[in-house]
């Protein structure tokens, strides 16, 4: 399984983002946002529509990167400050 992990600090608070391919048969990418070890948010995106494409691995990696970056932007913008 491929994935990305990032630590980010906002307003003196540490967040951890983890994005990974949940694997064959599950067919989705999940990003989880943690604050002080607690789950604040998760986002899942299916890649079932890509399953029969020859470049499946590349498509999954693109989805992982895109979703991870979107969630990083949301943390940076303060979306989770109130939690």
Image (spheres, helix red, strand yellow):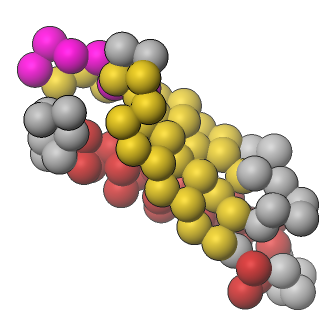
Query: So how many labels did they put on this image?
Result: 0
Instruction: List x then y, in percent, for residue 47.
Output: 69, 74
The chief SS type of the magenta part is: strand
Instruction: List x then y, in percent, for residue 8.
Output: 32, 25
Is 11 placed left or right of 3 in the picture? left
35 up-or-down from 45: above or below: above
Instruction: Determine the residue positioned at 74% across, 45% down.
Output: 2
Instruction: Determine the residue positioned at 73% across, 86% down.
Output: 49
Is 26 placed left or right of 43 in the picture? right
User: Can residue 8 be seen in this snapshot?
Assistant: yes
Instruction: List x then y, in percent, for residue 75.
Output: 25, 40
Magenta segment? 11-16
10 up-or-down from 75: above or below: above
Q: Is residue 58 magenta?
A: no
Is 44 placed left or right of 10 in the picture? right
46 up-or-down from 19: above or below: below
| Location of residue 23 by image quarter | bottom right
Instruction: Determine the residue positioned at 33% across, 44% down.
Output: 72
Q: Quadrant of the N terminus?
A: top right
Instruction: List x then y, in percent, for residue 26.
Output: 81, 62
Instruction: Determine the residue positioned at 69% across, 63% down.
Output: 28
User: Can residue 7 be seen in this snapshot?
Assistant: no
Q: Quadrant of the C terminus?
A: top left
């Amino acid at each position: 399984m491929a994935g990305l992990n990032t630590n980010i600090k906002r307003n003196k608070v540490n967040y951890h983002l983890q994005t990974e391919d949940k694997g064959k048969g599950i067919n989705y990418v999940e990003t989880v946002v943690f604050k002080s070890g607690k789950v604040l948010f998760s986002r899942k995106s299916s890649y079932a529509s890509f399953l029969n494409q020859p470049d499946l691995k590349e498509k999954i990696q693109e989805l992982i990167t895109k979703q991870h970056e979107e969630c990083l932007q949301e943390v940076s913008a303060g979306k989770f400050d109130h939690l």
